[in-house]
Image (cartoon, grey):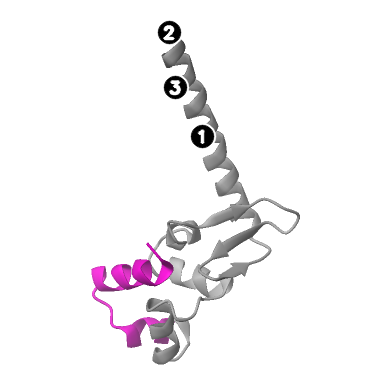
């Protein structure tokens, strides 16, 4: 699921109008609608504000097919663009998820050897 679908679903779930959310974000309704339709991607700062409105983590709003590229800039591919310089908190979340997955793989390997 893309960012637009996720934020639209959250908005509808909370019975908010696009105008109300746009006002909370201090942007125009048309700009907000472009995010919901994935015609534009919100900046990382704006994505963080959206996550706060819905009491979610930024990573919860990222597309399901989000590509994590570990490099010196710590970038995440979003739709057609890239958000650079992720916050330390997001990097930590990804690193924790990777560690948990590695542990799950180790456990599965142990079970298959038994």
Region rendered in magenta: 1-24
Q: For the residues marked 3 and 1, what is the alpha-carbon distance in whole angstroms?
A: 12 Å
68 left or right, relative to 60: right
Q: Residue furthest right?
A: 72
Of the numbered discs 3 and 2, the one sitting upstream in the chain is 3
Q: For the residues marked 3 and 2, what is the alpha-carbon distance in whole angstroms?
A: 10 Å
In which quarter of the view is residue 54 placed?
A: bottom left
Label of residue 72 in the image: none
**Disc 3 target residue:** 108
Q: Residue at x 49, y 80 (%)?
A: 40
In which quarter of the view is residue 102 placed?
A: top right
> Under tag 1, what secondary structure?
helix
Name the one closer to the observer, 35 or 45.
35
- In reply to whether residue 114 is colored magenta, the answer given is no
Q: Residue at x 41, y 87 (%)?
A: 23
Q: Residue at x 68, y 63 (%)?
A: 85
Q: For the residues marked 1 and 2, what is the alpha-carbon distance in whole angstroms?
A: 21 Å
Neighbourhood count class around disc 1 (C-alpha, 10 Å): few under 14, some 14–19, many 20 upward: few
């Amino acid at each position: 699921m893309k960012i637009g679908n996720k934020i639209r679903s959250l908005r509808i779930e909370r019975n908010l109008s696009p105008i109300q959310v746009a006002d909370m974000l201090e942007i125009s309704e048309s700009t907000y609608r472009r995010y919901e339709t994935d015609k534009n991607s919100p900046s990382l700062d704006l994505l963080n504000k959206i996550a706060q409105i819905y009491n979610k983590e930024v990573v919860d709003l990222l597309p399901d097919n989000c590509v994590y590229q570990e490099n010196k800039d710590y970038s995440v591919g979003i739709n057609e663009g890239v958000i650079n310089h992720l916050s330390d908190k997001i990097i930590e979340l990804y690193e924790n998820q990777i560690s948990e997955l590695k542990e799950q793989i180790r456990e599965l390997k142990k079970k298959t050897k038994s």
